Image: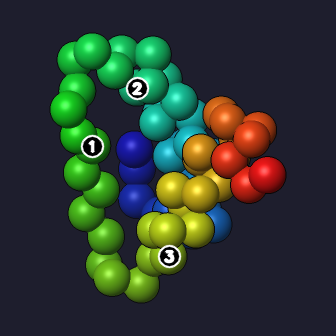
């Protein structure tokens, strides 16, 4: 993934990459995303979960 803000600039790239990694789940125990501290990762995680699990917010 190239430079950019995960909250806006590269959000689509991040979601695409995480979605692809989900299908390879057996190869990963964790995914570490290092940020500058300005990103709202809870929001990012919730959006990714909601995109893949429609009942997440119900």
Query: How busy is the neighbourhood of tag 1: few (under 14 within 10 Å), some, or many (20 plus)?
Result: few
Please tell me which residue is depicted at 59% across the width and 45% down the height of the picture: 49
| Residue on which the image places disc 3 | 40
Please tell me which residue is depicted at 27% across the width and 43% down the height of the picture: 31
**How much space separates mark 3 and mark 2, taking CA atoms?**
21 Å
Q: Position of residue 14 (x, y in %)?
A: 51, 46
Q: Which mark is residue 31?
A: 1
Q: Quadrant of residue 54?
A: top right
Q: Is residue 3 left or right of residue 56?
A: left
SS of the residue under disc 2: helix
As drawn, the residue found furthest toward the bottom would be: 38
Q: Quadrant of residue 53?
A: top right
Q: Position of residue 57 (x, y in %)?
A: 74, 55
**How much space separates mark 3 and mark 1, taking CA atoms?**
16 Å
Q: Are marks 3 and 2 in contact (CB under 8 Å)?
A: no
| Residue on which the image places disc 2 | 21
Q: Is residue 29 left or right of residue 49?
A: left
């Amino acid at each position: 993934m190239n430079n950019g803000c995960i909250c806006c600039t590269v959000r689509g790239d991040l979601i695409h990459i995480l979605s692809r990694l989900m299908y390879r789940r057996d190869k990963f125990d964790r995914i570490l995303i290092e940020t500058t501290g300005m990103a709202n990762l809870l929001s990012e995680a919730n959006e990714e979960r909601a995109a893949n699990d429609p009942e997440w917010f119900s």
